[in-house]
Amino acid sequence: MNIPYLSFDKINADVKEELTPAFEKFIASNWYVLGESVSAFEQAYANFNRVEHCVGVANGLDALVIALRTLNIGPGDEVIVPSNTYIASWLAVSYVGATPVPVEPREDTYNINPDLIGEKITERTKAIMPVHLYGQSCEMNAIMAMAKNHGLFVVEDNAQAQGASFDGKFTGSFGDINGTSFYPGKNLGAYGDAGAITTNDHKLANRAKTLRNYGSQKKYYNEEKGINSRLDELQAALLSIKLKHLHAWNKERVALAALYHEQLAGIGDLILPKTIGEATHVYHIYVVRTTRRDELQEFLQRRGVGTLIHYPLPPHLQAAYAELEYKKGQFPIAEEIANTCLSLPLYPGLSTTSLGKVAEIIKEFYHA
């Protein structure tokens, strides 16, 4: 038996007939950078996310970097980030010269705890960066209220939660300006690296377009020091095709997660994902927790089941952030999650039979 952690077979099959014509149109256009396909995808993704503007960029990290730059966040500033996110969230803050200030998550949702943000706000704080981790929306009403009370910007990292919502509003539409990733494994994945910025602010969108293109709006005339981070025409064309299927794929993810909930409830010391009342979860990742994580992962691997750990070491303990001088134990919730989390197979096309086999093997592990 072999059940991979992730498979693109069904997703590729769903869009296969549309991909070849799109590729042929791309080749025939003789226009490969910032053309009609990028514009069309930007409009389609803005409509999907219910925002006024979308700016396509090369990847999710660049999306966050450019978003922060449009807000003039830089050296001497602080940005509040989760203590248990993927390191890209912190890196974006570092790349603009600002300092990431970590805040612990809730133990049940793994998302940043709004109740703890206030104590980390200083006169240097310029923004809050909520990360919708694993596919569940953060508690955006509370975060937006906190930001408004303190005069702070909000920059959402929406890389893992395309199509999720809080109180009926989509993630990626709350903040002043937001970034997302279309890395292949995301719920909406490209066939390579890609990303986007979303905002309802016309001026921020225009500046983001300038910054992604060498700081230029008119060829060979540069208004500021920008970077080269442009969503290419081919990826945009293919993403436009996949975007039409995203709601259906997310619905399938949610249904598979419900089966895991049902079949794994009450098993050993497993802690299953929890979704809070006003949030929705699109299960980019199905994460369980157990004090026997490494044993369970090895047991599943021997039985042919792929798993991953998201993420084994929190940013504050990474060598890359040694200069911040954080010590082990300073962010105990992030560390506990890192030491106990395990991501199980969940993707469009995973059969209920295969999911049941995964559940059976986990039960066998605990009964043994």
Image (cartoon, rainbow, N blue to C red):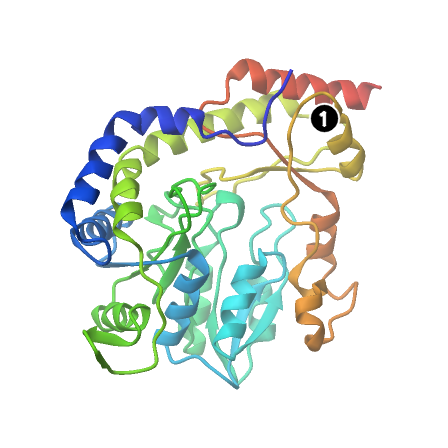
Quarter of the figure with residue 25: top left
215 shown above or below 115: below
Q: Is residue 28 left or right of residue 352?
A: left
Judge by depth and name the residue closer to the eye, 221 or 260.
221
353 shown above or below 18: above
Looking at the image, which residue is at 79% across and 64% down? 328
Q: Where is residue 198 in the image (x, y as percent from the top left)?
A: 31, 59
Q: Is residue 355 left or right of residue 363?
A: left
Q: Position of residue 343 (x, y in %)?
A: 62, 37
Q: Residue furthest top?
A: 353
10 Å neighbourhood of mark 1: few (<14), some, or many (≥20)? some
347 shown above or below 72: above
Judge by depth and name the residue closer to the eye, 107 or 192.
192
Judge by depth and name the residue closer to the eye, 312 or 269.
312
Looking at the image, which residue is at 44% across and 25% down? 9
Q: The residue tagged with tag 1: helix, strand or loop?
A: helix
